[in-house]
Image (spheres, grey):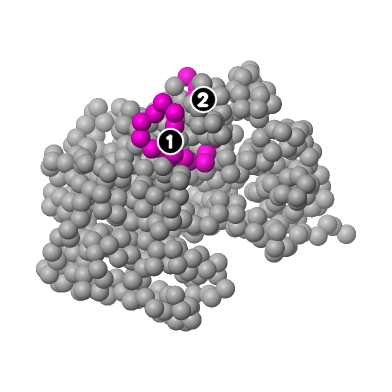
Amino acid sequence: MHIRDGVRLPKGVAGGRRKFTTLVELCTARAAAEPELRAYSFYADGRTEWDALTLADLDRRARALAAHLTPLAQPGARALLCFEPGLEFHIAFFGCLYAGLIAVPVAPLDGTRSSVKVSRVESILASCRPALLLSTGLTFAKCLEVVEESPALAGLVRIAVDEIDPAEADRWTPPSIGINTPAYLQYSSGSTGEPKGVTLTHGNVLHNLALIHDNLYRPADEEGLPRPTSVSWLPSHYNMGLIGGVIDPLYAGRSALLFPAGVFVRSPVSWLRLISQVGRADSCAPNFALDLCVRRVAEVQLAGLDLSGWEMALIGGEPVRAHTLDRFCEVFAPAGFRRGALVPGYGLAEATVMVTSAVVGEGPVTLRCDAGELTRGRVRPVDPPGGRQLVSCGPVSPSITVVVADQDTAQECAEGEVGEIFVQGQSVGTGYWNRPDEVFHAELPGRRGSFLRTGDTGFRWDGELFVTGRAKEVIIVAGANHHPHDLETTAETAHRAVLGCCVLGIEDGQREQVVVLVEAVGDVDPEAVEMAVRRAVHTGHGVRVDDVLMLAPGTLPRSGSGKLLRAGCREAYQAGALRRQAPRA
């Protein structure tokens, strides 16, 4: 889809009322309007500020980097961005855009050749064939042996962003780019297979920024208050982290307080402490982050928190679970957290990031459905405590089109019928880089234009979009469809020792076997936990579990943002690479 029109800045954000057609125009206009605004602050340990960038700093250093890159690569060339947590990524990202290059954010290397990160980066490199590798001098020094031992990485021109002289900014000339020029490639987390790079244009990203801002409208906007500070630990190479911690602050006219995901995972209270410290704040996270806080934040830590200023907690990136939301509200209400701050959302990299979200201030909308009917693709509400409780991902904005259609016939589903979710709009990317794929060009009877076939399943109910799971991950048992995250929700509550789990459907040539990979604390009887998991899944879903594999905490493959990598779990299980906990003697 070719986009002809740009977007204006939100009312009250300095930078002019003209329409912007590129992210470069957006950044330069914001820097000119508020040069001294402390836009980004980085807290390396989650407690104290380590580094900061004003808008003027960002603009000048991006121009300097762009001037340095221009002689090294042609416009449209790809540049791999491989950064540990910090603000150098921001400079590299906008520096690439200022040079007319296509940025390709990837997870940082850790200096070990055996790391799964190396093979993943190499697969991305094979996909997009970049000319440049951007990082910091320290990372290059730490990973020099790994880079030089990889023929693919060794052939790239290496640029240490932190070693570029800011004075080079005076040599910068604006690139010849437009609204339909690719800005960056967003590679998937790999949770459902090989990573594929979504091509996102400047126009795609600008329109999604406007959609996000509109979807997250709140009463404070009517009072003329600026959007609150964004607090984020999400990695910058992850789509939620890139938009929320790097690009959205420019568009929304807000500051961003950032810290490493590793700090959050080790100490979840660090996230809540920073939100408490900021006062009025927005923050986004996947569902698992709320679970982690409930499990790991002690009462003595809770006593020192004030979460009353947490205005918007956008929850997305993976299935949102009603139980998780309820427990989080219950545990953190004494610290001032309000249920109305919870904003479940739905999105995917193929649509930049956001498709829908709940309304800020209203709290999550839930619906209890007959579980048996749901497996047959029909919604029948039931009274509590029965049925399966689903969380709405909000209404659909008028600026996009969302259709639920039958996966086989493409006929549009009626309200309350489960089908595949199709999306059309200017936030939808142009396709996968160098990889023809029909998912971006689906046609629906009676609808004009092409649609993105998301691979996600869901239904419409009373003006709300409910997402039930990923079509590719559906496990079929006795003709009924079961989504892995539903079975996981049940398995995780089966025994107090269960910390996390992954449910897989493994085809053995005759039928689909159900396998549950369980991370559990070590000081328990694995056989007791296994029996509890089998019993809970069978009682709750009528599904017989074929294998339960007990694992040590931290064993299951996850992305940098903590998202379960289902494809990695499947590969490790089938290869016999997961070590089973032995039963007690």
Residue lying farthest to the right in this orientation: 585
Query: 241 above or below 226?
Result: below
Instruction: Give the extent of the magenta segment.
Output: 442-462
Percent position of residue 45, x then y: 43, 61
User: What secondary structure is marked by label 1?
Assistant: loop
Left-right relation of 9 to 189:
left
Q: Observer-nearest residue: 521 or 177? A: 177
Residue annotated with mark 2: 413
Residue at 69% x, 46% y: name it.
Answer: 505
How many C-alpha atoms fall within 10 Å of the one at disc 2: few (<14), some, or many (≥20)? some
- Alpha carbon distance from label 2 to label 1: 15 Å
Where is residue 71? Give x, y as percent: 21, 74
Instruction: Tell me the element at label 2.
Output: loop
Residue at (21% x, 66% y) in the render: 66
370 or 438: nearer the viewer: 438
The answer to whether residue 387 shows anywhere in this view is no
Q: Which amino acid does label 2 sit on?
A: Cys
Residue on which disc 1 sits: 443
Q: Which amino acid does label 1 sit on?
A: Glu
* Residue 204 as seen in the image, left or right of residue 459: left
Q: Nearer the viewer, residue 408 or 142?
A: 408
Q: Is residue 139 visible?
A: yes
**Image quarter of the C terminus:** bottom right
In the picture, which quadrant includes the N terminus? top left
